[in-house]
Image (cartoon, grey):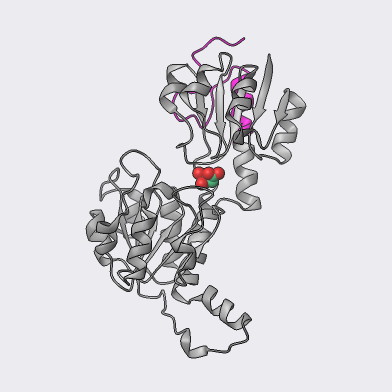
Amino acid sequence: MRDVLISELIVGPAVDALAERFDVLSLPDLWKNEAALRAQIGHFRALMVRNQTPVTAELIASAPALLIVGRAGVGLDNVDLQAASAAGIVVSSTPDQNAISVAELVIGLMLSLVRSILPADRDTRNGNWARHCFVGSELYGKTLGIIGAGKTGYLTARRAQAFGMKVLASDPYLTPDNILLRELQAELLDIDELLHRADVVSCHVPATPATVGMFDAARFSRMKPTAFFINTSRGKIVREADLAAALKAKIIAGAALDVRENEPPEPGELELLPNVVLTPHIAALTVEAQERVTSAICDDVARVLEGKPARNAVAARLPSRPHC
Ligand code: MLT
């Protein structure tokens, strides 16, 4: 029996250290080939993934010795948690390690949108000097609406407050007496009320059956025509066709998407709109965040392989299937 299979690009000193203690096989493109992944997984006690390996019930059924799935990141939409739990497999993720990087990217996207930085750059590269075509607006005094006020939403709000923004939050899991909301002096609102009042909306929501498609034509129609929409969480929460229609009809002023309904996306209408900023799911991709993420996930994988409880388990902290 082998120890750790890594099916996506996960590298760094923590992986090297893990490989000194355990038998690690790293195949960064394995996620692309389901049959090859299924052929390999039966030989391993641990699997390390990012967001692209589909850890399905079928894959889990092919993994009789698997004790832990280590998800290097936050979102768990590529892991069938129910199937893993039913099989007694620990699923561990790294919920807080990339929150700062995501929050910083949101601030960058927000500034890009309100100051048209990318259109101005493209225009200037084309030899123009059209200063008066790029009159922007300040963030100061504007209202940021955070949808999903977990760690990343909270850190984004703190940074926005440094620009003098007011903060609104919407989160079905929080109550107004939540300590972080109180610290932010943020009003907790129903989502539709938040959309109606915010100048910038930033989403920090996992993809679940309840959230997929939650940003549709009806939701965009509740936003101000001057408002900007930013999504760095999960692409499937947005109906992109509805977003493109809202932008074209000037129902909202602009949007920035780091995550897409399908990744990688087929280039379509959004790619043609000037008031859209698109990045390829890079919010968590900073040297610092990746170091933290990799180190936390390698630590949990090592712990479980040694029979210790995982620190960042999503469900069970110890596998309930026998070690072999
Ligand atoms: C996350 O969920 O941690 C980020 O979206 C990055 C990733 O999925 O790898």
**Residue 166 found in image quarter:** bottom left
Q: From this viewpoint, is residue 166 visible?
A: no
**Residue 186 found in image quarter:** bottom left
**Residue 314 found in image quarter:** top left
Q: Nearer the viewer, residue 185 or 295?
A: 295
Q: From this viewpoint, is residue 253 visible?
A: yes
Residue at image x 45%, y 58%?
A: 156
Please state if 52 lies on the left or on the right of 252 as rendered.
right
Please state if 153 lies on the left or on the right of 319 as rendered.
left
Query: Where does the image place residue 154, in percent across and percent down from the top left?
Result: 41, 54
Which quadrant holds the C terminus? Answer: top right
Which quadrant holds the N terminus? Answer: top right
Please state if 24 lies on the left or on the right of 110 as rendered.
right
Please state the extent of the stretch shown in magenta in the rendering: 297-324
Query: Where does the image place residue 13, in percent across and percent down from the top left?
Result: 73, 39
Query: Where does the image place residue 89, in percent across and percent down from the top left?
Result: 50, 20
Residue at image x 51%, y 50%?
A: 99
Residue 160 versus residue 320 in the image, above or below: below
Q: Nearer the viewer, residue 324 or 77?
A: 77
Please state if 237 lies on the left or on the right of 289 as rendered.
left
Q: Is residue 22 magenta?
A: no
Query: Where does the image place residue 81, in percent across and percent down from the top left?
Result: 43, 27
Residue 50 versus residue 310 in the image, above or below: below
Residue farthest along the right direction in this orientation: 20
Residue 8 versus residue 238 in the image, above or below: above
Q: Main secondary structure of the magenta part?
A: loop
Residue 263 versus residue 92 in the image, above or below: below
Residue at image x 45%, y 37%?
A: 77
Residue at image x 31%, y 56%?
A: 169
